[in-house]
Amino acid sequence: MSDIVTNVKTAGVVGAGGAGFPTHVKLAAKADIYIVNAAECEPMLRTDQQLAARYPELLLQGLTQAMEATGAKEGIIALKAKYQAAIKALEPLLPPQIRIEILRDIYPAGDEVITIWLTTGRRVPPGGIPLHIGVVVNNVQTLINVAKAMQGEAVTTKTLTVTGAVKSPVTVTVPIGTAMAEVLALAGGATCAQPAYIDGGPMMGKVMTDLAGPVTKTTGGLIVLPADHLLIKSKQQSVKSVLQIAKTVCEQCCYCTELCPRHIIGHELPPHLIVRCVNYNAVGNPQILRSALTCSECGVCEAYSCPVGISPMRVNMALKAEFRAQNLRYQGQLGQADPMAEHRLIPSARLVSRLNLQPWYPPDAPLQPEVYQPQQVTIPLRQHIGAPSVPVVKEGDGVTTGQLIAELPAGALGAPVHASITGIVTQVSSQAITIRKGSGSA
């Protein structure tokens, strides 16, 4: 194992913008192209573009080190044209083997598969991963963490945007394990009487029932909206209700399929046919039903394309859970891309309008340079794909920022966990470790 892979594994680096796939596993593979996903797929979130503008040297260091580990000969930084501050910061520093690819302001530019297609022309096969076509993708924050890992720094903080119905939209950096309620307070609190909260972006984020939970390595952002906003209502709708509505009103207009980002680049995935099959007690081609496993859950079919308010995405999610429980997989071929594919991607401004987000879409959420210092953190043992980490500390132990507090089980997929503040361990459970700020002495 190379020093780069070892250092990244030791530092606990995982994908900061998605499910938290351990980065050292990606770096141990071989690839032709390494892509920095700086396109910030979701409207309202600003973290990646701001970090790229503030820390261009670290980003390029992390990308260069990742390219060295994987043997990639080309590095690509995917940025939307409107991210001028990031582009201007990076352009003077680019080495010959790294280039910037300018993307239009469309959704879902920033989705891993779509970003690969837009920047390289290569298409990830259905059910496949980028490595199958010689590509590795990470976002900005992940690669900055790679650079820090090479300097001996473990992953102890997370940068995220706090926006929407808040007093002062802001992008903050907080120790991992900080309560989401404290993060909201950094933006001045909610400005609506009955707020609801989304962890992540408006399209793919999840509604949080409360703010007691902690920030993790994969927290995407914090969006506050009124509880009666159409996005909140849609995300809280039960699967049973979704299926009942689909049976009642689906008119098979095919808009969900014609605008599905996976379908337009050649994946079989046809949401309208899946809905039809489900409406008729799964009578239809089993292969079509299993294509639901390739759904990226981008939300286009739910939030944008359907004229009668059906959520094919939620139907796909229910099918995915059922198929995975049965250990079933989709096996299909990559077809021809839609010749109109690039024109079927959605302008971000139009998406914001369709989602009725304009009243809560501030022009900026400035990045604060200082790291917030909470009095207590609760650090989950599982912040990544794979097995939870195993505690190596006990209640009463003193710890310092960056100290290992939970290690990766031998032979398991996952990542170690480190103390994000200096203090005393006050609780160790099977799910998390709580640390209260203090001297850190035993």
Image: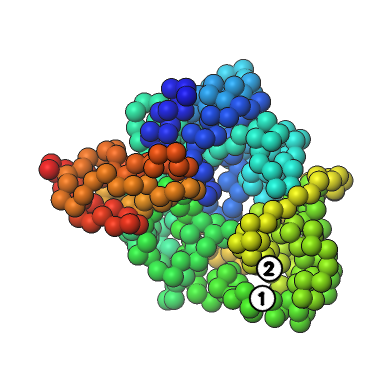
> Which of the two residues, 44 or 384, is positioned nearer the viewer here?
384
Say left or right for 39 vs 280: left
188 shown above or below 283: above
Front-most of residues 202 and 254? 254
Q: Position of residue 365 (x, y in %)?
A: 46, 51
Indicate which disc residue 315 carries: 2
What is the crowding at mark 1: few (fewer than 14 residues within 10 Å), some, or many (at least 20)?
Answer: some
Q: Which percent across, then down, holds residue 54? A: 45, 35
Mark 2 lies on a secondary structure that is helix
Q: Which mark is residue 242?
A: 1
- Of label 2 and label 1, which has the lower sequence position? 1
Label 1 SS: helix
- In the image, which disc is placed on residue 374? none
* Residue displayed at 53% across by 77% down: 228
Q: Amino acid at mark 1?
A: Val
Quarter of the image for residue 186 reads: bottom left
What is the total number of numbered labels drawn onto the structure image?
A: 2
- Marks 2 & 1, CB-CB < 8 Å contact: yes
> Disc 2 and disc 1: Cα gap in Å?
7 Å
How did the renderer colour the structure? Answer: rainbow
Residue at 74% in and 59% down: 290
